Image (cartoon, grey):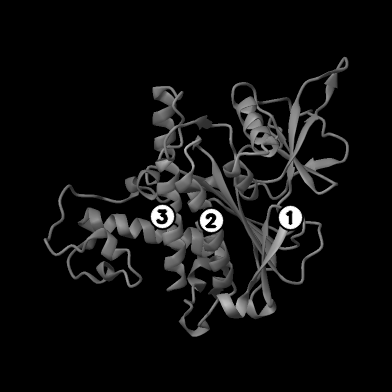
């Protein structure tokens, strides 16, 4: 973690990245990510070993010419454009920055979600105190395998940006629910069955709130509905065409993870981005951006959306006044809005990536859960 004086000067041609939702933002002694007027962003290289580890990761990926796994990985991370020196002191650069692709540069109504992946977000070098601290931040991560660290959404209904901070994202914890050691009945349905589309255990006649299995399921539903559901909601309905496009990208990432034994990712995130529009009929194609190329997903051929079956979730509007949610009139992206839909998912944050000789089951667990929860939204 790097802190600096509030008098820190911005680099020429840059400004704080207004759509940053995770990590330390510019101000209060932090550099944060900077937006460059050439359509890229600058991410400060942290003090060793963290910053060097992330730099080495990007350089290995984008310099490789014969490793097919690394070449494939390029399409799942922001494009890397090298290292940029920062402000100087007597001719010596005090800071350096990674120059990376700006994933929301073309979005006029950006929606951004940062999802930290893994049951464990602490790396093998973490102290016992660090381990305890990471676990305490969001205990459900041990069961979910992922957690939200921040969300920014252009709300079509309100015609403004709505920011959900980390406190909102962490508000659902096991500690807020009273759990008994034993289920009061032998009729409790198995977790996998309960996680089906209909969630049958929600209709139990006994006191379900005393059942650990029920609470586990309820926790998954809450996280999916209030987190993923709120992110993909525009108007009265979920953007199921966008959800389908995201699932498709996540499955490609899952395939890569199932076949690689080179890296173990800790405290790394998936960044979801899309451009807000209220109706899937607004666009004929969904543009899924990958490795600088646009891949069209025909909305009629690949997506079947029954609007009558989509859930009306207007009640979620009532939560916008709760702690951790900020509405802002002036926050916007200053780029041209594409006429067609845009959605993308990329892996980000690699300061805790370690060499490995095994599959990254920690990341895979969360990724597969995330895919499953997104699929459940399609049935609501």
Query: Does dot 2 land on a helix, a strand or a loop?
Result: helix
Decide: is 177 above or below 278: above
Residue 324 rendering spot, x and y as whole percentages? 54, 50
Relative to residue 313, is residue 52 depicted above or below? Answer: above
The answer to whether 82 is drawn above or below residue 270 in the figure is: above
Horizontal relation, residue 275 to residue 226: left or right = right
**Looking at this view, is 69 or 281 the one in front?**
69
Secondary structure of the residue carrying tag 1 is loop
User: Disc 3 on helix, strand or loop?
Assistant: helix
Q: Report the residue marked by disc 1.
A: 331
Q: Which residue is mark 3?
A: 369
Question: Distance between the Cα atoms at labels 1 and 2?
Answer: 33 Å
Label 3 or label 2, whichever lies nearer to me, is 2
Q: Is residue 342 left or right of residue 228?
A: right
Residue 163 in sight in this render: no
Q: Quadrant of the N terminus?
A: top right
| Residue 135 percent across, percent down from the top left | 40, 36
CA separation in Å, label 3 and label 1: 32 Å
Name of the residue lying farthest toward the left: 186
On the image, the x and y values in percent for residue 188 come to 18, 62
Q: Residue at x 83, y 40 (%)?
A: 14
Between marks 1 and 2 in the image, the one whose residue lies nearer the viewer = 2
- Give the mark, 3 or 2, whose residue is nearer the N terminus: 2
Q: N-terminal of the two: label 3 or label 1?
A: 1
Name the disc covering residue 134, or none: none
Mark number, residue 252: 2
Toward the front, the furthest residue is: 66
Q: Quadrant of the C terminus?
A: bottom left
Res 313 seen here: yes
Comparing 197 with 180, the one in front is 197
Residue at the spot 69% in from the left edge and 29% down from the top edge: 45
Report the front residue among 5 and 356: 356
């Amino acid at each position: 973690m790097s802190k600096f004086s509030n008098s820190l000067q911005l680099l020429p041609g840059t400004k704080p990245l207004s759509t940053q939702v995770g990590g330390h933002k510019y101000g209060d002694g932090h550099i944060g990510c900077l937006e460059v007027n050439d359509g890229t962003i600058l991410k400060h290289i942290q003090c060793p070993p963290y910053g060097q580890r992330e730099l080495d990761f990007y350089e290995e990926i984008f310099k490789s010419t014969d490793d097919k796994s690394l070449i494939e990985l390029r399409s799942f991370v922001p494009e890397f454009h090298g290292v940029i020196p920062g402000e100087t002191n007597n001719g010596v650069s005090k800071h350096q920055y990674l120059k990376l692709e700006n994933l929301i540069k073309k979005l006029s109504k950006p929606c951004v979600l940062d999802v930290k992946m893994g049951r464990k977000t602490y790396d093998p070098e973490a102290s016992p105190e660090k381990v305890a601290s990471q676990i305490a931040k969001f205990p459900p991560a041990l069961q979910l395998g992922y957690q939200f660290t921040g969300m920014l959404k252009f709300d079509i209904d309100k015609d403004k940006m709505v920011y959900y901070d980390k406190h909102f994202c962490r508000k659902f914890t096991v500690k807020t629910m009273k759990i008994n050691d034993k289920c009061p009945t032998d009729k409790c349905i198995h977790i996998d069955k309960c996680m089906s589309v209909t969630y049958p255990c929600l209709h139990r006649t006994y006191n379900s709130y005393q059942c650990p299995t029920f609470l586990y399921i309820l926790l998954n539903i809450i996280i999916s509905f209030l987190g993923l559901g709120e992110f993909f909601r525009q108007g009265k309905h979920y953007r199921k065409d966008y959800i389908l496009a995201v699932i498709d990208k996540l499955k490609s990432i899952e395939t890569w993870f199932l076949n690689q034994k080179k890296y173990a990712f800790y405290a790394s995130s998936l960044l979801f981005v899309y451009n807000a529009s209220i109706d899937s009929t607004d666009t004929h194609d969904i543009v899924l951006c990958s490795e600088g190329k646009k891949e069209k997903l025909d909305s009629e051929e690949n997506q079947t959306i029954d609007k009558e079956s989509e859930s009306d979730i207007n009640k979620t509007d009532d939560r916008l006044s709760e702690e951790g949610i900020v509405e802002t009139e002036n926050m916007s992206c200053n780029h041209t809005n594409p006429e067609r839909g845009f959605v993308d998912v990329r892996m980000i944050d690699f300061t805790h990536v370690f060499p490995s000789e095994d599959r990254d089951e920690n990341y895979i667990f969360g990724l597969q859960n995330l895919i499953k929860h997104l699929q459940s939204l399609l049935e609501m």
